[in-house]
Image (tube, coloured by chain):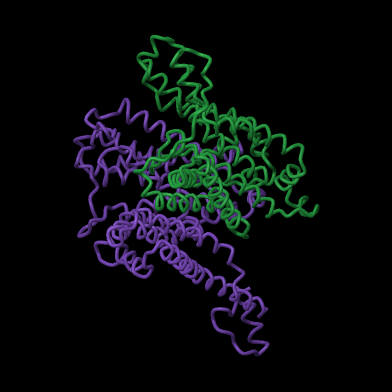
Chain colours: A green, B purple
Amino acid sequence: MESSLTELGWLTVPLAVLSGAIRVGTPFLFVSLGECLTERSGRINISLEGTLVMGAMTGYGTAYLTGSPWLGVLAAACAGALLGGMHSLLCSRPGVDHIAAGIALMLFATGIAFFFGKPLIQPRAPQLPDLPLGFWSDLNVVQANLRINPLFVIGVLVAPVMWWAFNNTRWGLYLRTVGDSAEAARALGLGVNGTRAMATMIGGFFAGIGGAFLSLSYPGIWNEGLSSGQGLMAVVLVIFARWHPVRCLWAALLFGGASALAPALQSVGISSGYHLITAAPYLLTLILMIVTSSPERSLRGAPAELALNRTD
Amino acid sequence: MDAFGARTDGLAGRRRRPFLIRSAANAALAEAILIPIAAVGVAFVLFGLFLAVVGSPPLEVFSSIYRGAFGTWFSWQNTLVRAAPLMLVALCTTIPAQLGLVVIGGDGAVLLGGLMAALCGLVLAGAPAAVGLAVMAACAAVVGAGWIGLVGALRHYRGVNETISSLLFTYLAVSVFRHLVQGPLRDPETQNYPGTYPIDPAFAIGEIPSTNIHWGLAAGIVACIAIWIVIKRTPFGQAMRVVGGNPRAARIAGLPVGLLTVAACALGGAFAGLAGFFEVSAVIGRANSALYAHYGLSAVLVSFVARHNAAAVIPAAIAVGGIRAAGGLVQRAHGLPDATVMVFEGIVFLVVLWSASWYGRTPLSRMAADGK
């Protein structure tokens, strides 16, 4: 970073934050899109941390064995969908708490991923190629910081498509009906559990892709400390995004950016308050929840069937 | 219902049915005992299938798990040491659960309670051990109580969902903890593993005589039993359960719902903070990131599989502690990865949670219902 300072001066910081926001934010983006879809159907899936780890392991292993990182992404997504299926199987039973089921599934998926991932810690799997979006600049630092992963681009495209689909397709209408009133959905003859199962599986599919990003792009390795709570925070991001897929994109960039700001500041010699900066988005979300909730109605804008939305 | 069921039996002069299904209450009791056993059995079958698929002999691994968890006094101690923090942190979920709240943020209270205990230990260096320990434990409990109590207050006065806010609170606690431990409070000699300065060795709480188990276990067991009595036998516990059953009815009956919410959360948080104190005083000797051992989420599940019954938290925590204690032996004896017991723990949790849907739907309760 010393040489880059001489080329761009303090501009390095915003540039590094931007590229860091994209890098750190991509798994956030996928888990939050997946969680958003699931929660719109009225169910909360808190197990996406396990899905992320499982996706990372499956993706890495598949890429290593087949030599194709894209097959790895696909395998990771399918593993995520499978875990989503397990979650909906559990949650469709009466008397099973969604939060507890999610935590248990998270432990289970993490255990499975560590179990089968043990032999994958050493070998190197082929990585997803970056898109050189900094080609227009002569500066190395610009080129280096604007090498964007194709998965991020896919996520950016998925967000508005999902938003459009919520509002303009039959499936979107079904999903929202089930999420806002299971009773109304039943009266219309919609299968509540089936719709939720589908939403949870597709949600898991996206979260699995987020996991593949971790092991196949950034940091681009597989080990047991790969995910540091990004999946658990999906629930928080979706609240921050007020259950809107496009806002999930901004939320992911903000949360990613906050994590990237500290290392960027460190590179120009500011190193105190590192962890407090990283925590800023969480504090912001908490404040947002405090401001927008009221004792009469919890979390305005949330799907009415969501367990989070119940009040006394 | 119990007495009524028994009387109709007698009047009708029918053959007496076996005790277990003589009344709905008996059937419920039988279910409460038999369903967890059946669920653990199913978990063993599923885990056995998993082992068979990956090419390990299931029965031999089961036997290793038993030996590693409960086979010898040594493994029992290993198990109990792991169960102790789980009991205390599980109460952080169990107590608010009486009001119908799902608090999953015990980890944050453990961290901040442990940090506070370490700070008190540093400030009081040289003081008599009893004074130091008492102040450390009290401050840790107060910090934990305040932290989770705030979650309860936000829930009641602002309608902020307690599950999400407690998760966020944990994240904030981690950040504050890391900031302090890696910055202002850091012992420069802790290079790779940043931590505070070590506390006075006199403030190590020590072990239960003739064991290697620290006093946290005794505290955990006493706390679980005490809370069980409080919930079942005191007006406070009764009030909490009324709120959990029907908050509107509770309010109409004049119960102070807000106060109960904050008190239940604070009490739970106090025990989680105490868990942090025991880790610092008895195990680590300072506050560092070893405190952040993710007891919280497993402890949440311990509370759930105990069906939020504080007394049942004790065996549930011991079972989970046992699974973890067996990890090393399973790894050594069978060449399996250390995550094997994690898979088993996950399967057990999943099946036991799934078994929540069996209550009231087993042949037992059907037969009891038919008798009416």
- Image position, residue A236 (x, y; %): 55, 37
Q: How many marks?
A: 0
Q: Residue at x 41, y 35 (%)?
A: B174
Residue closer to the observer: B213 or A145: A145
- In the rendered image, the quadrant that contains the N terminus of chain A is top left
Asked which quadrant contains residue B129, the reply is top left
Q: Is residue B105 visible?
A: no
Q: Where is residue A88 shown, x and y percent of the image?
A: 60, 54
Vertical order, A37 against B243 (above or below) = above
Q: Which residue is at 70% across, 43% downward?
A: A304
Q: Position of residue B202 (x, y in %)?
A: 19, 42
Q: Is residue B364 left or right of residue B195?
A: right
x then y, percent, for residue A210: 52, 39
| Relative to A198, A230 lies left or right | left
Q: Is residue A232 above or below residue B223?
A: above
| Residue A165 against residue A132 in the figure, above or below | below
Please indicate whether residue A98 sits to the left or right of residue B61 in the image: right
Q: Decide which of B299, A201 is in the foreground and name it.
A: A201
- Indicate the quadrant where residue A275 lies: top left
Look at the image and tell me whether residue B11 can be seen.
Answer: yes
The residue furthest right is A188
> Could you tell me which residue is drawn at 59 percent across and 80 percent down?
B22
